[in-house]
Every structure is written in structure tokens, then in C-alpha cells.
Image: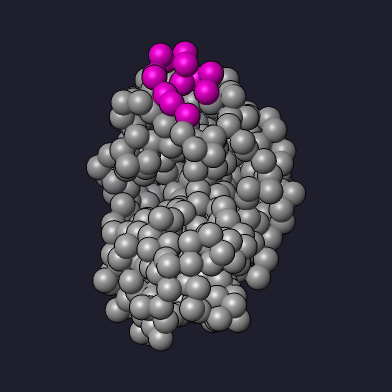
Amino acid sequence: MIYDVIIIGGGASGLLCAITAAQRGRRVLVLDSSNKVGKKILMSGGGRCNFTNLNIEPDCFLSNNPHFCKSALSRYTQFDFINLVEKHEIPYEERSHGQLFCKGSAKEILAMLLKECEQAGVQIRKHCEISSVISSEEGNKTNTNFKLESNLGEFESQSLVVATGGLSIPKMGATNFSYKIAKQFNISVLPTRAGLVPFTFSDNYKEIFERLSGVSQEVILKTANKQFHENILFTHRGLSGPAALQLSSYWNTGNSILINLFPNDDLALLLNKTKKENPKLLLRNLFTQKLAKKLVKELEDLFWSDWRNNYIADIPDKVLNEIAENLTAWQLKPSGTEGYRTAEVTIGGIDTNSLSSKTMESKSQAGLFFIGEAVDVTGHLGGYNFQWAWSSGYVSGLVV
């Protein structure tokens, strides 16, 4: 029950750390509380696992310390993980915005990681509930730094890696374990909130979005300081889809968001041109060339109900300009988000100022490491968070 390295959490970062450490000859044990390791890997990307992105850049990550992620990301890049995927002959494909997905199943990525673990001699124990983690006394006979008590017995190790993730998707087993361990060792934990999560509404827009549920539309969605040009998806609770998920990570409660429904057009210019070239056209017939019919009907009720049956030639320029403004800067105020229940990531967590950016080791507690989603580094949608898991797992695995 004595190991060189114990890793708590058998997710993406924990498994990559285990492989890296074991390949160095370290005796490694992975402990996981669930009945199956890598559950988030299996469910990711609609079961196809969006395992990384070709365009990994530090500015695609949120953190109180935006420079923290640079070292790990540069030492284990997206191309390093791609090489591992290719070594195992797993077919993959590139989708929009540089996202890489398995052509087959996410099961192939998990199987690859477990095969690497097996070949390197990593031991994995599941159904393990840890009741306490204590730092061993100096000068102890076994030369270990940590003692863990669990339902499977006592374990000791020189190095301890906490890779239990954040609070997102509790039905997958997410807990606050990593934060509890950090606080136990006086390591700062920053406030957390749900990220990459759908917006919800409680005003009259809730009913409108319920009627629009299932409609997808390419837009530019923005807050005061960030914007994304991707699709939104109207739901019975509010707004989802890539643009909404991305923006949620930058949105704060009480703030408004703006939707540009014509991201590829100068709408005022288009209306002016149409008025001259096709004066007998109704606005709804013009807009349904670009937008879903159900969406146009709701917009008509909101923004030009008094002119719904007027030809564009009969609508004053001032009114057309107002309509253009409303459709390219449609202001909404979400009441909140769907929270951790459906969030893909947790923003905040272990304060990066408490960790080494090169190794993920605690600056105050020798031998204690935090990696993956537990740390205050959150990527954009599209494989970025997996890459952070691989990179942080690798750099810690080199030194544990």
C-alpha cells in the first residue's frame, strides 16, 4: 500500500499524469471514487470526444493569472497528444474552428489511455472513497509524505496528485474534494462558478424562447468585452449553442448580452438596397432569406408589428434604421445560467499563485500537486479543456 505517486481522480489529467510518471519508473496508483474511470471523456463531444484543438493559444484560457497556463501548454502541445492518438491508430477528423474529434467513439481515447497505463504498470482502484489525507511526520520510517485513509484501506505515497476536477456535472460524480484538500493545506481557492453553460431567462423572453426551442442561428453574441461568432440554439429555458456556451464564461450576473442576427451583412445597407431594388417586398420575406421563419415571426412581433403588412418602400428610413439596430444589437438580460448541472467546466478553483506553473506542485506543501479542472485555468469550448488536462497532467507526471 506504499507508492511513489498516488493520483486521486481517474479523469483526463489524472490518467495522463499516471502514464507519464509510470513511464519514468515510478510506482503509481490511481484512486477513483466511481465505478468507471474517464466518465467525462466518454460523454464528451456527443460521445466522439473533442480531444484537442489545432489552435491552442494561451488567450483561449481564462484565469486570474493568464500567464500561468503558458508553460504547461508549450511543453505538452496539441501535437504531442495527436501523436499519441495516431500511434494508437485512432481515426479522427477536424471540424470547425480547429476542433478534433474521434471518427468513431470516445471509448477509443479512454481505451488508449488505459492501455498506456497498463503497459507502464499503473495500478487503478475504483469505488474508492477517501476519508482523510494527512501529511506524514518528518523522519517517518517509510519515507512517505502522505497517508490516505479510505474504504479500501490505508495508502501512503511520496507524491500526491489531486485530479478530481471541479463542480461541473455533479451527476458524473463531481465534488468539491480538490478544494477541500487545498484548504486543508492552506492553499488558496478562488470563488467558483459554472462555465460553458446555457443562459436562462425569467422575463417575457422565456416564453418567446420556449416557442423558438430547437431553432439554431448563426450570430455574433457579445458582452461588453468579449464576442463569439458561432451558432446559438434557442431552448425552452433560454439560449444554448456554441456562442452562448462560450460567452457564458465571460458573463457576470446582471449583465446584458447583445445578439447580432446578421453577422455577415451590413443590415442597414441591405435594407436600403432592397428598398430601391425590390420595393414591394415585405420585411418578413426579406428576413426569412437569412433567418428561420419561426424566429422572424417572433422578431416581427417585437420590432416591427406596426409595419408587418407594409411594403418596404412604405416604411420610413428612420424606422428601417431602428429595425436594423434592433436586429444587429438585440439586447437581452439573462436571469442566470443552468449552473453546474449542465456546465461543461468550472471557472475558478485552486489559485494558480499557489502552484508552480512548470510542475503544478504546491509552493507551500512539498509533494502535493493539483492538475486539470481543479485549477483556476478554464479553456474555451472545442477541445481546449482537454488540452489543459493533458498538458497539466504531463508536466506534473515528469516530476512526481
Above or below residue 362? Residue 281 is below
What residue lies at 55% left-to-right and 75% top-to-bottom? Answer: 320
Q: Position of residue 199 (x, y in %)?
A: 42, 68
The residue most toward the right is 67
* Residue 225 falls left or right of residue 166: right
Pick the quarter of the image with the N terminus: top left
How is the structure coloured here? Answer: one colour
* Residue 302 falls left or right of residue 126: right
Closer-to-camera residue (366/373): 373
Q: Position of residue 146 (x, y in %)?
A: 52, 45
Would residue 86 be counted in the magenta stretch? yes
What residue lies at 43% left-to-right and 56% top-to-bottom? Answer: 290
Q: Position of residue 259 (x, y in %)?
A: 52, 67
What residue lies at 42% left-to-right and 20% top-to-bottom? Answer: 116
Q: How many badges with numbers are in the image?
A: 0
Residue stretch rendered in magenta on the structure: 82-94
* Quarter of the image where one finds residue 217: bottom left
Would residue 393 be counted in the magenta stretch? no
Q: Position of residue 137 (x, y in %)?
A: 59, 49
What residue lies at 31% left-to-right and 52% top-to-bottom? Answer: 172
Q: Is residue 76 visible?
A: yes
Above or below residue 327? Residue 45 is above
Closer-to-camera residue (341/188): 341
Above or below residue 324? Residue 112 is above
Pick the quarter of the image with the C terminus: top right
* Quarter of the image where one finds residue 317: bottom right
